[in-house]
Every structure is written in structure tokens, then in C-alpha cells.
């Protein structure tokens, strides 16, 4: 199936329509081994060239396709840690050191060798530039033991930080980055990495990464490259995907059978990456309005999640835990005290909470206090249709309890910039975890994770939570009971303060076509998350694809 040129009007931004059609036609005519796959990873608006993996919003593929960490932690499969640039790790000094053995024969894409000196530089670079240390690890030193061995020391035990240290610290070449005066402002237009792909070309509507001929994993990648596209939103991207113009996407499609699979059942496939994250309303706690716990709690109980999930998410999500915990994956970490805790829909209680806190309903039906209305905006990404639908339902639900809720749609880059700067009232976004509950709580609850460092977009500060996270980090991973006690303490604070307002526990749909490439992750072989925006999974997937 193919779409006419007229049907494509509006699918890509501006002059990109003709470029999109021309590129798709050109690639389809090429031999399989030379064909560039077309990818949509969620971008809307024009691209801004930035391959700086230290930046909050580098181009998709920068992490994973161009730059690699030492190990790959597969979240699609329990306890699956795969060696990449390193082949072995060992804790020492009571958890305050990590020693890595590096892989032989790795080169940077400019032909220079990847060395132990590069690895030591990467950790010292983060130590000396705190803005780059997104994972918040307290690095003391990084020393070269020998040509293939590096020892990293820390001020505290880092038992729980292996994923951050080895799995989310992307290696950059010392010879390129050492001379850069301010790495936070570098756009890195000519990236040099160890990954399976390198930059080929860039335009405002699309950019291409081609295979790296110097890649260390012999015989990989087999595909020629990937072209990333921007669309005006999910509907436009779905149209392109269903027409066969895209090979790989991560789009919320309410009727995935009718809108995608049925268009070409032989080649159109998808994988539901179940229960990876929690979709939250994120109140900016630095704003006086949301510093009032009663306001947060009133919003929380005013939401009918079942209605939202049905109308906005096509019943693909599930009710979230009020503990900001992904279940059933981490059900064993739920505090006995909160074992029966569930999100509540109780509009009368919402009004009672507000009135008890001194809010009074005005003639316009909106609560006010000290002359200020209970009114605020909520940022979302333009074209993310599930979020747009969510906003409509939430707006009506909050209106019913006397709260004025104003959706504010932004381009993806503007949305992320607002989250990073704190220039927003509320936002709807996902909270991602990791291989254990610690990571979700560290990412969204730690004071160290307040942007630009990480995902604590609410700017929540809680000394008890910080202390519990520090205690977990100092506990050997085999002492599960001790770790759970600290997890329970964090859950107590989340229940008491409601720093985030959960909407749903969600899953992500990854769509792909086998007409031009095979070897995608499957239920039988979940070797990585199949999502094109997941890092570094996108690189693991792309390097394992076979041209068809």
C-alpha cells in the first residue's frame, strides 16, 4: 500500500513532505544491503543538530547508535547484563570502587584506538564538570591500572549504581573532548564514537546515521543505516507507517490491528513493551500553588483513571500504583503497610481537601485563596495524541471539582527545555525506572536528580528520601531485606506528600516492518527493548538487524 502525494500533505513539517516521499522511493529501489531504514522516534517540529551525548536533548540515536556504554543492561529480560566496551567488572573496597576490564580491538570511528586512558578520562571529566554527571555518582578518582584495566573509586558505596556507572555512562574520546572548554554548550556536529553507526547527513526534517566500518563487533551492523524523521504528531507518523513509508517507529496507535497490522499482515509487526514506566502529572513544587500538599492531593483524588485510560489510551494501560512503583515487576518491594494502597477517585474528597486548606469556591465555580484562583497550565508535547486526549479528560474532571486546568501544547524541544529550566506549572510526562525499584525512586525523587541532572522534574526535596537512597547505595545487593526497609521508607514519604500524580502504568508500542529488515526483538527473543527512542537499546537492535 502507498499513499498519494496529496494524502501526505501535513504528515511531515513544511518542505519535508517532498523530501520524505523522495527518500522513501529512493531507498525502496536500492539493493537490501544498501537500503537506509526510515525511523520515527517521536520527534515533532524541525530537528536541531546536536550529537552531544551530555546534552539533555541530543538527537535520537546519539546514545546507543553513536556512543556506547561499557555494558548493556537489558530491561526487556531480567538479570541480563551484556558486555559492550568492557568485558568484566568487579566491586572492591566495600563497594567504593569498580574495576573494569576493557574489550580488545575497539576503535573510535576516526580510527584511533579506544583505550583505558579514554575510560579514565570519561569519569574524571564528569567529576570535574558536575553538570555532566547526570547520574549523580560521587566520583573520587579514575586510574589506569594497565592497558586494558581501569579502576574507578567513589566517596560512597555504589552497589546500586552499576547500571548508571557501567550502563548509562556513554564513552567519548579524550582526544576530541579534552580541549572543549564548555562541554555543555557543544553541539558536536562531527561526532566520533565507538558505536555501530556514524553521522552521514543532517537536515531540519531528517538526519541519517550510516554504518560504522570500524565497528568492533565483527560483521555488524549489516544494514546500511537509519534515517530519522520528524512529523507533526502521532497521527501523521501513523499514516506514514501504515503506508509502508516507515520501517521502525514507537507510536501510540489506539487500534493497532486496524490502523497498522491489517495494512500488510505479512510484514507489519509490533511489540508491546509492557509496563516500563508510569505516566504522571508533574506539579512544579517550586511554584507556590503546588507547594501546598492539599492541592496536589485534591488533584490526585479528582482523577478518574479508568476513564482516562479508556478514552485516552485505548485501555492499553493499567491503573498505576500510588507508590510510583511498576507492578507486578516489583510487587515484592511493596511495603506491607501499603499493600492495599490504590489510586482513588473521589471528587467529594477533593473538594473537602481544598476547603480544609482554606480554599473557597468563587462565583465562577473555581476555587480561590488569598485572591488567587486555583488555575494553572499543564505542558504537553504537540501531536502526542494520547496526551492530548488525556488533557481533555483531565480538564473536564478538574473543572467538576472547581479547578481550572489549561493544557499548553509545545514542540518536543520546547517541552523538554521547560522541564529542564523549571519554567512550567505542571507537565504530563513519563517516569522511567530501571533494573530495580531504586532507580525509579532515585530518578524522580532524589534531590540529586533535580534537572538538569535527571528526572526529578517536580523538584521534590525530602531529606528522609535522600537518606534512604543513600542507605540503599551503601548496602550490598544480596542484602535484600535491608534494601526493602529503605524502599518502604521512601514509599511512606510518597504517600504522605504526593509529589507526583500518577495517571497510568503504561506500556510502549514498538512498530516495525519486516519487508526491508528482519531480526527485530520478539517475545521469544527479547534481546533489547524494541523502541527506537530507548537508549542504548536502539543501537543494540539496529546492529542486529538483517537486510531483507
Image (cartoon, rainbow, N blue to C red):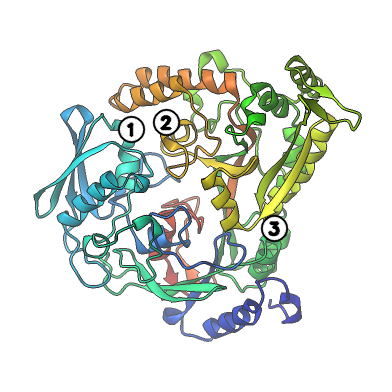
| Left or right: residue 199 compared with residue 5 | left
Q: Where is residue 521 in the image (x, y as percent from the top left)?
A: 47, 56
* Label 2 SS: helix
For the residue pair 431 and 299, the one nearer the viewer reads as 299
* Label 3 SS: helix
Crowd rating for badge 2 (residues with CA inside 10 Å; few <14, some 14–19, many 20+): many
Determine the residue positioned at 32% across, 28% down.
473
For the residue pair 192 and 186, the one nearer the viewer reads as 186
Determine the residue positioned at 56% across, 57% down.
413
Q: Which mark is residue 160?
A: 1
Q: How far apart are marks 1 and 2 (CA)?
A: 8 Å
Q: Is residue 189 above or below residue 283?
A: below
* Label 1 SS: helix
The residue that mark 2 highlights is 438
For the residue pair 3 and 129, the one nearer the viewer reads as 129
Q: Distance between the residues labelled 2 and 3?
A: 36 Å
The residue that mark 3 highlights is 257
Q: Is residue 284 above or below residue 385?
A: above
Q: Examine the image and state in which quarter residue 43 appears.
A: bottom right
Determine the residue positioned at 52% across, 20% down.
493
Q: Where is residue 224 in the image (x, y as percent from the top left)?
A: 41, 76
Q: In this view, does 273 lie above or below 504?
A: below
Q: Position of residue 518 (x, y in %)?
A: 47, 67
Q: Is residue 110 above or below residue 154?
A: below
Tell me if label 1 and label 2 are in contact, CB under 8 Å: yes
Q: Position of residue 93 (x, y in %)?
A: 16, 29
| First in residue order: circle 2 vs circle 3 | 3
| First in residue order: circle 1 vs circle 3 | 1
Amino acid at each position: 500500500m502507498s499513499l498519494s502525494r496529496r494524502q501526505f500533505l501535513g504528515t511531515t513539517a513544511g518542505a519535508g513532505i517532498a523530501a520524505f516521499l523522495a527518500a522513501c522511493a529512493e531507498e525502496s529501489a536500492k539493493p537490501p544491503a544498501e537500503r537506509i531504514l526510515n525511523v520515527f522516534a517521536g520527534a515533532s517540529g524541525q530537528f536541531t543538530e546536536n550529537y552531544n551525548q551530555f546534552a539533555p536533548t541530543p538527537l535520537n540515536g546519539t546514545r546507543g547508535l553513536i556512543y556506547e556504554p561499557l555494558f548493556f543492561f537489558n530491561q526487556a529480560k531480567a538479570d541480563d547484563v551484556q558486555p559492550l566496551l568492557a568485558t568484566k567488572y568487579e566491586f572492591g573496597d566495600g563497594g567504593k570502587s569498580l574495576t573494569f576490564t576493557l574489550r580488545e580491538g575497539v576503535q573510535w570511528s576516526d580510527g584511533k584506538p579506544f583505550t583505558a586512558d579514554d575510560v579514565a578520562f570519561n569519569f574524571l571529566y564528569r567529576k570535574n564538570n558536575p553538570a555532566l554527571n547526570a547520574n549523580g555518582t560521587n566520583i573520587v578518582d579514575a586510574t589506569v591500572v594497565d592497558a586494558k584495566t581501569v579502576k574507578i573509586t567513589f566517596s560512597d558505596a555504589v552497589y546500586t549504581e552499576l547500571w548508571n556507572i557501567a550502563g548509562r555512562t556513554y564513552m567519548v574520546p579524550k582526544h576530541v573532548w579534552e580541549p572543549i572548554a564548555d562541554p555543555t554548550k557543544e553541539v558536536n556536529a562531527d561526532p566520533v564514537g565507538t558505536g555501530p553507526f556514524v553521522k552521514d547527513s543532517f537536515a531540519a526534517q531528517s538526519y541519517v546515521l550510516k554504518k560504522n566500518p570500524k565497528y568492533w563487533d565483527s560483521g555488524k551492523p549489516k544494514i546500511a543505516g537509519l534515517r530519522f524523521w520528524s512529523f507533526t504528531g502521532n497521527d501523521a507518523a501513523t499514516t506514514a507507517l501504515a503506508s509502508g513509508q516507515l520501517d521502525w517507529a514507537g507510536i501510540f496507535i489506539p487500534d493497532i490491528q486496524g490502523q497498522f497490522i491489517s495494512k500488510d499482515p505479512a510484514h507489519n509487526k509490533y511489540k508491546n513493551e509492557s509496563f516500563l514506566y508510569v505516566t504522571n502529572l508533574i506539579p512544579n513544587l517550586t511554584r507556590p500553588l503546588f507547594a501546598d500538599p492539599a492541592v496536589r492531593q485534591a488533584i490526585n483524588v479528582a482523577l478518574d483513571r479508568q476513564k482516562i485510560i479508556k478514552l485516552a489510551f485505548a485501555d492499553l494501560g493499567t491503573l498505576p500504583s500510588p507508590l510510583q512503583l511498576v507492578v507486578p515487576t516489583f510487587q515484592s518491594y511493596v511495603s506491607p503497610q501499603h499493600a492495599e494502597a490504590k489510586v482513588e477517585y473521589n471528587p467529594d474528597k477533593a473538594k473537602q481537601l481544598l476547603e480544609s486548606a482554606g480554599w473557597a469556591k468563587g462565583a465562577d465555580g473555581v476555587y480561590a485563596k488569598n485572591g488567587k484562583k486555583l488555575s494553572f497550565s499543564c505542558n504537553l508535547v504537540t501531536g502526542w495524541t494520547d496526551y492530548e486526549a488525556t488533557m481533555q479528560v483531565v480538564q473536564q474532571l478538574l473543572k467538576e471539582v472547581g479547578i481550572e486546568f489549561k493544557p499548553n501544547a509545545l514542540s518536543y524541544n520546547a517541552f523538554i527545555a521547560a522541564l529542564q529550566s523549571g519554567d512550567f506549572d505542571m507537565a504530563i510526562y513519563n517516569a522511567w525506572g530501571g533494573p530495580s525499584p531504586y532507580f525509579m525512586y532515585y530518578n524522580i525523587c532524589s534531590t540529586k536528580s533535580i534537572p538538569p541532572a535527571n528526572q526529578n522534574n517536580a523538584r521534590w526535596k525530602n531529606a528522609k528520601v535522600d537518606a534512604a537512597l543513600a542507605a540503599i547505595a551503601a548496602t550490598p545487593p544480596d542484602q535484600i531485606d535491608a534494601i526493602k526497609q529503605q524502599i518502604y521508607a521512601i514509599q511512606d514519604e510518597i504517600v504522605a506528600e504526593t509529589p507526583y500524580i500518577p495517571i497510568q502504568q503504561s506500556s510502549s508500542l514498538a512498530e516495525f516492518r519486516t519487508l526491508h529488515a528482519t531480526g527485530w526483538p520478539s517475545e521469544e527473543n527479547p534481546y533489547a527493548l524494541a523502541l527506537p527512542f530507548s537508549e542504548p537499546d536502539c543501537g543494540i537492535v539496529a546492529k542486529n538487524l538483517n537486510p531483507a
